[in-house]
Image (cartoon, rainbow, N blue to C red):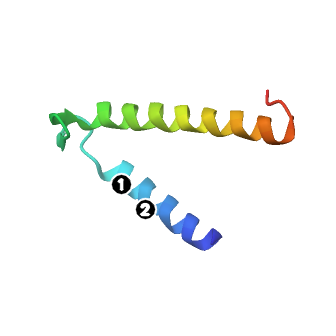
Amino acid sequence: MLAAYDAEWELSQQTMRDVDWSGFVEGYRGPIRVERLLADVLQESARHLGHLDIVRELIDGAKGE
């Protein structure tokens, strides 16, 4: 399982090196700049990780930082 994670990590790193940051991709509501799309994905990921942290705290009572 760790090997699969490492492979995905390397693929994502290669994608980040190769992408045209000022380019556009097709989004749900039309074209969106690549740099904006990445910011949106990071924000959404952080939000969901926060939700998971709350669930973990409810399960074991331990508090994060």
Residue sitting at the far front: 58
Point 86% across, 35% down: residue = 62
Q: Which residue is mark 2?
A: 11
Q: Amino acid at mark 1?
A: Thr
Q: Residues within 10 Å of mark 2 (few under 14, many from 20)?
A: few
Q: Are marks 1 and 2 in contact (CB under 8 Å)?
A: yes
Dot 1, how many residues are within 10 Å of its Cα: few (below 14), some (14-19), or many (20+)?
few
Q: Quadrant of residue 25?
A: top left
Can you give x and y, in whole percent of width and height, for residue 2 in the image? 64, 69
Q: Residue at x 62, y 32 (%)?
A: 50
Q: Which one is in front, 34 or 62?
A: 62
Quarter of the N terminus within the rendering: bottom right
Direction from residue 47 to residue 64 in the image, left or right: right
Q: Which mark is residue 33?
A: none
Secondary structure found at label 1: helix
Which residue appears at 38% of the width and 32% of the height? 40
Residue indicated by mark 1: 15
Q: Up-down: is 10 above or below 25?
A: below
State the image quarter where residue 29 is shown: top left
